[in-house]
Image (cartoon, coloured by chain):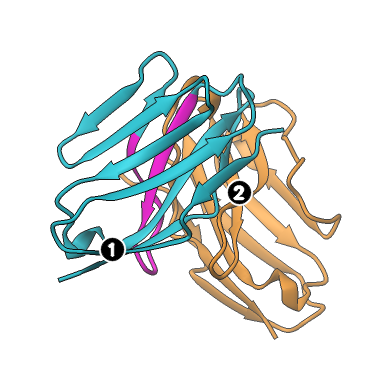
Chain colours: A cyan, B orange
Amino acid sequence: GENVEQHPSTLSVQEGDSAVIKCTYSDSASNYFPWYKQELGKRPQLIIDIRSNVGEKKDQRIAVTLNKTAKHFSLHITETQPEDSAVYFCAANSGYSTLTFGKGTMLLVSP
Amino acid sequence: GAGVSQSPSNKVTEKGKDVELRCDPISGHTALYWYRQSLGQGLEFLIYFQGNSAPDKSGLPSDRFSAERTGGSVSTLTIQRTQQEDSAVYLCASSLHRTGAGETQYFGPGTRLLVL
C-alpha cells in the first residue's frame, strides 16, 4: 500500500517569511495529492491539490509542486501570516478509493 | 449547504463500555470515510464506504471496531469493549465520488472520545 512521509514535523517562521513542507510517497500509481490545513480544534480543510498531469499549481500565496520521478511533492506558502499557523497534512491517493495522509506539520508563524 | 456533521461532539466513557459514533455526510455524496486522529498524530484510515459496494475495512485496528452505513447515507462507527488506547478524535469525511478519481474529501468536526 501507499506510504507517505512528511517533513518537518514542526516549522517556526517569522511573519512574512516563506514556509516549505515536503512529502514523499511510495506508490508510483498515485496520481492525486491534496493538502489539508487543520486549525486547533477544527476540522481538516482542503487548501490546494495537484494531479499528476501537472508539475505545479498556485493559488495566491500557496503553491504545490510535484516531482513524479522522485515521488515527492511540496507545499510552499509565501508571505506567511499569523493566521497561517495550523497543522498541515499532505496526502496521496491509495488505489482508486482512499487517501493516505502524512503525519502532519505544525506551522507556527510569529508576528 | 450543510456540511458533514458528526455526533456526539464529545464522548466520555468507561473502559469496557461500547460506544456509537454517528456521521451524516453531505447529501448526495456516495463515498464516506472514517479516520482516527490521536494526539499529535496524523489521520489514520479506518474504513471506507462507496455506494452499495462492500466497505473497505482494511484500516480497522481490531475486531472491536465495526461500522455500517444505512441507505447509503448516515454511518455509525461502533467500538465495543472500549480501551484507553481508543481515546482519540474520530473524524468522518465524505466525497461526491471516490477520492481516487480526485474528488475532494470534506471532513466533519469529529467526535472526541475519552475512555477512562
Residue type, numbered disc 1 = Ser
Is A67 placed above or below B86 here?
above
Disc sitting over residue B94 in the figure: none
- Which residue corresponds to mark 1? A85
- Residue B41, given in percent of the width and then of the height, sits at 57, 62
Left or right of B63? Residue A26 is: left
Q: Which residues are magenta?
A: A32-48
Q: Are marks 1 and 2 on the same chain?
A: no
Task: Give the residue drawn at x 53%, y 33%.
Answer: A92
Task: Give the residue drawn at x 72%, y 33%.
Answer: A1
Q: Farthest residue to the right: give it.
A: B63
Residue type, numbered disc 2 = Trp
Dot 2: element: strand
- Which residue corresponds to mark 2? B34
The residue lying toward the viewer, choosing from B78 and B87, is: B87
The residue lying toward the viewer, choosing from A74 and B91, is: A74
- Structural crowding at the residue carrying mark 2, measured as other residues with C-alpha within 10 Å and reported as few (<14), some (14–19) or many (≥20): many
Left or right of A82? Residue A7 is: right
Left or right of B100? Residue A3 is: right
Task: Tell which subunit mark 1 falls on.
Answer: A
- Residue A42, given in percent of the width and then of the height, sits at 37, 63
- Residue B49, given in percent of the width and then of the height, sits at 64, 35
- Structural crowding at the residue carrying mark 1, measured as other residues with C-alpha within 10 Å and reported as few (<14), some (14–19) or many (≥20): many
- Find residue B70 and report its image quarter: top right
